[in-house]
Image (tube, rainbow, N blue to C red):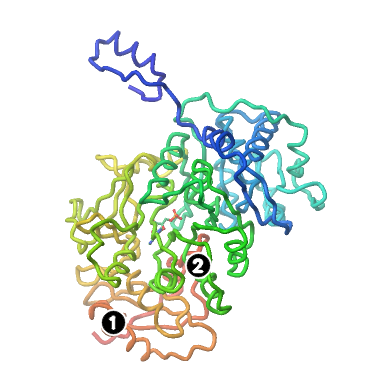
Amino acid sequence: MSIAMPHKAVWLINYIFGEKIMLGLMQNWPLTVDKIMDHAATNHGRREVVTRSVEGPIVRTTYSEIHARAKQVSNALLAEGIAHGDRVATLAWNSGRHLEVWYGAMGIGAVLHTLNPRLFPEQLVYIINHAEDKLIFTDLTFLPLLEALKDKLATVARYVVLTDKDHMPECGLKGVIDYESWISDHSAQASWGGFDEHTAAGLCYTSGTTGNPKGVLYSHRSNVLHTLLTMQKDVMGLGARDVILPVVPMFHANAWGVALSAPAAGAKMVMPGAKMDGASIYELLESEYVTFSAAVPTVWMMLLQYLESTNSRLSTLKRVAIGGSAVPERIMRLFEEKYGVEVLHAWGMTETSPLGTLGSLGPEADGLSHEEQIKLKLKQGRPPFGVEIKILRDGMQAPRDGQTFGNLVVRGAAIAASYFKGEGGDILDQDGFFDTGDVATIDEHGFMHITDRAKDVIKSGGEWISSIDVENVAVGAPGVAVAAVIGKYHPKWDERPLLILEMAKGASSTKADIFAYLDGKIAKWWMPDDIVFVDAIPLGATGKINKLALRETFKAYELPTALVS
Ligand code: AMP
């Protein structure tokens, strides 16, 4: 029986068919995201949302203004004929206006589709057409990109530029209009919600490293439950006193839910707009008294380099969530040991809304030395209530011993059950778990450690070598800027690791120096069979190492050890 059915209908069917189910007698309060912004405006209405605008100046607004303007967006969308289930897209940086569009669209049951500008143009065309987006909201930054693609975007009837009339350039996009003019005549009264909590709310495509990107269609219910689970004390633990700077973009895995959890907590938001360099982020952290921030390791590397080179301190920042790829030890140590900032190592994916695990330490860490605690914090952490994880090796559940690698599978309140329009077929196993494509271990306390992507793990003589672990050590060698490890064919061992390095400018380390550095830091049989230097290691659309491209570049390469065996 569908849980989406209204209370009374379920009761009636049970009554008629004589099923012995006693329903609770509590209110039916559908979990829809509009309630989050209603709550923020009612209870934290004066709390600020501060944006570094694409036009330049810092713009200050409040939840109460965002709420009113989001309602204007709803009315403007309705006037465009946007109905329940219609997809409207954003190609935009984190900003107050972007937040208004999210709530304005979701509040009336439209589906908010976030587009990642870092995807290849052909992928964007594919995604927009696949989603059948009717309207695209864009920042000024992306007008040239959209102008180049517009003839291929069959379903888009109008482009709304997130700016005002004074900043609107000449532009040949269909129906193009500046956001301020588009909402200006519309009322700030609109009715939100009132639909089933299982209604689709958001759409985000996976980055599609193999095949076409696939759409993850979040529901209002999954978004609200994800919000509640990220707010738990041992997860992001957000509160009304927090000032949150989400560097993680709203277009990649929902800014890790912060665009929903910050208003739910009544926390002040600081939106970085298009500027994510070390100096710009530092300026906002200090001038807005930011206490919590979230970003991928590359962004933190830029900030830390800035702090180191300018001898600056962080005066208010208390905690940072880092995820998207593994946290390098250097970042962990600088934050925790030098700048007094707690690092929360998080793992997740588009399909998991995205938060899956997070590395807050519990009482089991109390007796550990600082070094042991750092080691534990470098793991990706434990699932919060609402997420279940386990490791499968050859189809069997692996022991929780912190040693046995296997495929990481996940089940929970905000995990995808299938992709948009059925792409990719059935994605759950018979127990309802989703295979993440990651390879991991879980220890006795439940801490998960990602050791690889399933397709990147190096299978050497029946054992598995973690390319990520080797990369994390290699990146600590003097002069190394980026390190990547791929498996190459070996006649005796099937595969052996090849270490590919991009060096920092002016670095002088030789192959022998790097081998000497690795010696003793990784297991002997994990030692790469060769090291090669390249000018640049290719990165994918979400800033991660593009191993597919590396494998292609090194297709004809043969390991010296393979030639001699
Ligand atoms: P995406 O859906 O683009 O966010 O990518 C999700 C993938 O990023 C995961 O399946 C992991 O392979 C990787 N990932 C995310 N967080 C981490 C982390 N903390 N450590 C290692 N890999 C991560």
Task: Give the secondary structure at mark 2.
Answer: helix
The dot on residue 183 is: none
**In the rendered view, would you say 524 is above or below 346?**
below
State the quadrant of the N terminus: top left
Q: Residue at x 51, y 51 (%)?
A: 242
Q: Nearer the viewer, residue 102 or 116?
A: 102
Residue 253 locus on image (x, y percent): 48, 50
**Mark 1: amino acid:** Ala
Q: Which residue is mark 1?
A: 562
* Residue drawn where x is 71% and y is 40% of the image: 158
Left-right relation of 365 to 325:
left
> What separation in Å lies between label 1 and label 2 (alpha carbons)?
39 Å
Q: Circle 2 is placed at which residue position?
A: 300
Q: Amino acid at mark 2?
A: Trp
Quarter holding the C terminus? bottom left
Q: Quadrant of ligand 1?
A: bottom left
N-term mark: 1 or 2 = 2
- Respond yes or no on whether mark 1 lies under 8 Å from ligand 1: no
Query: Dividing the picture into quarters, in which one does residue 81 lie?
Result: top right
